[in-house]
Image (tube, rainbow, N blue to C red):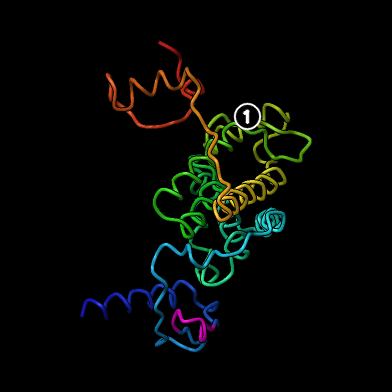
Amino acid sequence: MEAKKKLLTRRDFLVSAGGAAAGLALATSGLGILTPKAEGAMVDLPEYPWTEYFNKPLDVERVRHLGAENYRAGQGCCEGAFRALLTELGEPFSFIPPQLMNFGKGGVVAWGTLCGALNGACAAVSLVYGGQPMTLIVNELMAWYSATPLPLEAEHRSVAGNPLCHASIANWCKVSGKKASERGPRCAALTGDVAAQAALYMNQMLEGTFVPVFAMSEETKACYDCHVGGFADDTLGKMDCKGCHEGH
């Protein structure tokens, strides 16, 4: 009964979430079968994580292009980055409906929290790698985003200082002199850059050349050691504190 329940849950997920896009066939790969017609299709997805299905390097520049194009097509930053990586990864990753990440645009439906491009890219990384490899890549991607002038090839580049959409856009507005409502071309390019950086890190992990370089500043580490599990033990986070808090 438990096995049947698990299988039906997978089937229901793919059939309902995929909708019309479920006209896909996975007949000869050994992963199960998804027939284009119907509601009764039964699918047994691979065991997680799907590391073994990532066996050749990704085209980083194609991912960058796809991410930007996806944003311009109206998919938003989160779905745009996620879709770009899944498209380049191919099967079985491409069977996951990328629309499930649409909620992340604008820092989660415009709440300005975690940058959607980061959110989508990290979700794709998590499909490929579980456990420590995922943690290493995502940690590095978050740090890279926080400290890098973005978009990489743009007239106006800005450093977010943290992974928040709110800070990223506010700092860009200060640098560019533009309004947040004019962010479209900027966020399209940024979506491509973030997806591409995730692809680069995944390629390095695949090749055994990935070396994390992120390190907290001494100032942030002093705050962290006290406030995260230390004397104060009253918060959680790795972000630069001075972006939002005064010293004490």
Q: Residue at x 55, y 69 (%)?
A: 94
> On screen, 50 above or below 11?
above
Secondary structure predominantly adopted by residues drawn in magenta: loop
Extent of the magenta region: 25-32
Return the residue nearer the eye: 56 or 169.
56
Residue 226, how many percent across, how many down? 33, 20
> On screen, 3 above or below 189?
below
Residue 136, how many percent across, how many down? 47, 44
Residue 4, how many percent across, how many down? 27, 81
- Residue at far left of view: 1
Return the residue nearer the eye: 66 or 45.
45
Q: Quadrant of the C terminus?
A: top left
- Residue indicated by mark 1: 171
Q: Amino acid at mark 1?
A: Asn
Left or right of 25: which side holds 185?
A: right
Q: Residue at x 66, y 55 (%)?
A: 67
Residue 29 is a magenta residue: yes
- Residue at far top of view: 248
Indicate the quadrant where residue 39 lies.
Answer: bottom left
